[in-house]
Image (cartoon, rainbow, N blue to C red):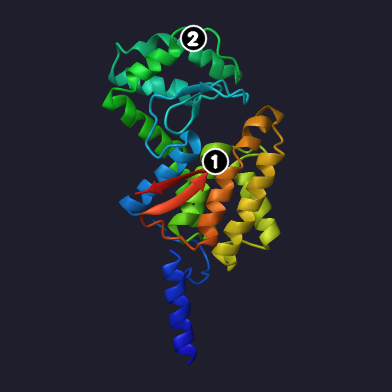
Amino acid sequence: MRRSLMLLAVLLLTACGGEPWPDAGHGPSEVALSAAQRHVADELVAVFEHSDAAPHYDAVEALGDGRGYTCGTIGFTTSSTEVSTLVESYTAQVPGNRLARHLPRLRELAAGGSAGTGGLPGFAGDWAAAASDPKFRQAQDDLADRLYFTPALRTARRLGIRTPLGVAVLYDSAVQHGTGDDPDGLPALIARATGRAGGDPAGGVAERRWLGVFLDVRKDTLRHPHDRDTAAAWAESADRVKALRDLVDDDRYRLDPPVKVTVYGDDHQLR
């Protein structure tokens, strides 16, 4: 009888698109994503950043969030060294590209952490032109990997995260919040979540529960950030946390495609 009930529970979960989560472990993990799971994780970030699962390599927008221009697939910013680093890398490969002329100003903006966008005439058009070059698109992918995905994966393993969805949650959080030591950054979110949950998955806390607490902490931070310059833009983006929480609640921890996600009122099928 008990076995029959357990089988029924598994069938019901599968019918709803979910599966039972792995048992809580102890210590660091060796979690890894397959190519298909990584693709879904990248599409999640793209949907959250651009409301479209396709990569927007040509995107340039001033969001008014204190970060200057936000550019490309992952939302690289001119107020940090991200954009200048990317243009430097691309210029090393393609010296005559149209973005190279903006490097002195990009370095100035990054050095001052400036929210300004002045002194970059024609920048958006030059960025869009570069985005047609596979080398520039690859440079964006490589920098996103180095700055966000790889640190998120390393952090997930240290925390004892054992699911692809857990890695994707940290990856998207790193993209939006950064990995620095400020009170709105990913390390601070993790510390607050671990405190509220009474530990982390490496210490035996169920991953599903820890992720729920982490996403609650992230939602609170989006609504009440320490950096007031980001307040308006972040308040509007809180729906991305709800979308991730829905995946946790629906037990879609494997991220095997297709994955349906609803964000900002639109449905997306990630494949």
Crowd around label 2: few <14 · some 14–19 · many ≥20 (10 Å): some
Q: Name the residue under label 1.
A: 264
Left or right relative to 121: residue 55: left
**Is residue 69 something one can see in this rendering?**
yes
Q: How far apart are marks 1 and 2 (CA)?
A: 31 Å
Can you tell which quarter of the image residue 4 is in?
bottom left
Query: Measured along the vertical axis of the image, is residue 213 above or below residue 239?
Result: below
Can you tell which quarter of the image residue 122 is in?
top left
Helix, strand, or loop for circle 2? loop
Residue 1 location (% of width, % of height): 48, 92
Residue 75 location (% of width, % of height): 48, 30
Q: Are marks 1 and 2 in contact (CB under 8 Å)?
A: no
* Number of the label disc, if any, that sits on residue 120: 2
Helix, strand, or loop for circle 1? loop
Which one is nearer the viewer's eye here, 253 or 175? 253
At 55% across and 61% down in the image, what residue appears?
249
Q: Which of marks 1 and 2 is nearer the N terminus?
A: 2
Left or right relative to 102: residue 206: right
Left or right relative to 85: residue 180: right
**Is residue 178 something one can see in this rendering?**
no
The kind of residue on which mark 1 rests is: Tyr
* Number of the label disc, if any, that sits on residue 103: none
The kind of residue on which mark 2 rests is: Leu
